[in-house]
Image: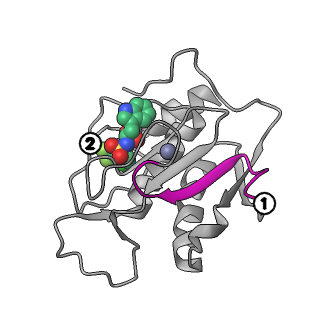
Amino acid sequence: HYSFFPGRPRWPSNKRTLTYAFLPENQLTDNVKAVFGKAFNRWSTVTQLNFTQSESYRTADIKIAFFRGDHGDGEPFDGVLGTLAHAFSPPSGFFHLDGDENWVVEGMNTPLTTMSAVDLESVAVHEIGHLLGLGHSSVEESIMFPTISAGTRKVELASDDIEGIQTLY
Ligand code: TQI
Ligand code: ZN
Ligand code: ZN
């Protein structure tokens, strides 16, 4: 079953459009940015929320950045595997990904042979759930289940994820 964060934080009901921006220094390719766009779309199709990319990292609601190791928020990344990414509950909007992972972007023909391959879209859909206010779920098929096997792709919302987000919004 789905869960929420303590106090059930969520984005305000008068804010139907959330903006997101990428840390300019990361210089992400359009391919990588498109993966985040697809991940946001999965949540917008089951809610009244809309997500639009902003060119202003400072003022965007959701701030997406790749960092390595200690990056100043008290939750350092740890190199390959272990922690892959973290996102904070609303209305913080911080979405950080571990730059040391072997991120795999679908359709980019990355060798999936490495045991440490991590599918970017799978992690993005999960972290966006956190950014919107979902905690972890006990349902194994759900996007919000707290574990995923390396090299696995899980991007489709399960009915449990949909019930959770529709209860919150
Ligand atoms: N990062 C954890 C996560 O996002 C961070 C975390 C631990 C957390 N406990 C939390 C976040 C409680 C919110 C509330 O769950 S992670 C997965 C999964 C991670 C794990 O790097 O371990 C995914 C990130 F589910 F696959 F294990 C993304 Cl998809
Ligand atoms: Zn961080
Ligand atoms: Zn999680």
Residue at point 44% right, 61% down?
Answer: 121
Viewer-closest of 12 and 25: 25
Q: Earlier in the sequence, mark 2 or mark 1?
A: 1
- In percent of width and height, residue 18 lies at 73, 47
Is the shortest distance between ligand 1 and the CB of mark 2 under 8 Å?
yes
- The amino acid type, in three-letter code, at marker 1 is Ser
Label 2: few (<14), some (14–19) or many (≥20) C-alpha neighbours in 10 Å? few
Alpha carbon separation for disc pair 2 and 1: 33 Å
Q: Which residues are magenta?
A: 56-70
Q: Which mark is residue 56?
A: 1
Whether residue 109 appears in this view of the structure is yes
Residue at point 76% right, 52% down?
Answer: 58
Does the magenta portion include 57?
Answer: yes
- The amino acid type, in three-letter code, at marker 2 is Thr
The answer to whether residue 14 is left or right of residue 62 is right
Whether residue 160 appears in this view of the structure is no
Q: Which residue is mark 2?
A: 147
Label 1: few (<14), some (14–19) or many (≥20) C-alpha neighbours in 10 Å? some
Residue at point 16% right, 66% down?
Answer: 115
Compared with 129, 116 (above or below) is below
| Quadrant of the frame with the C terminus | top right
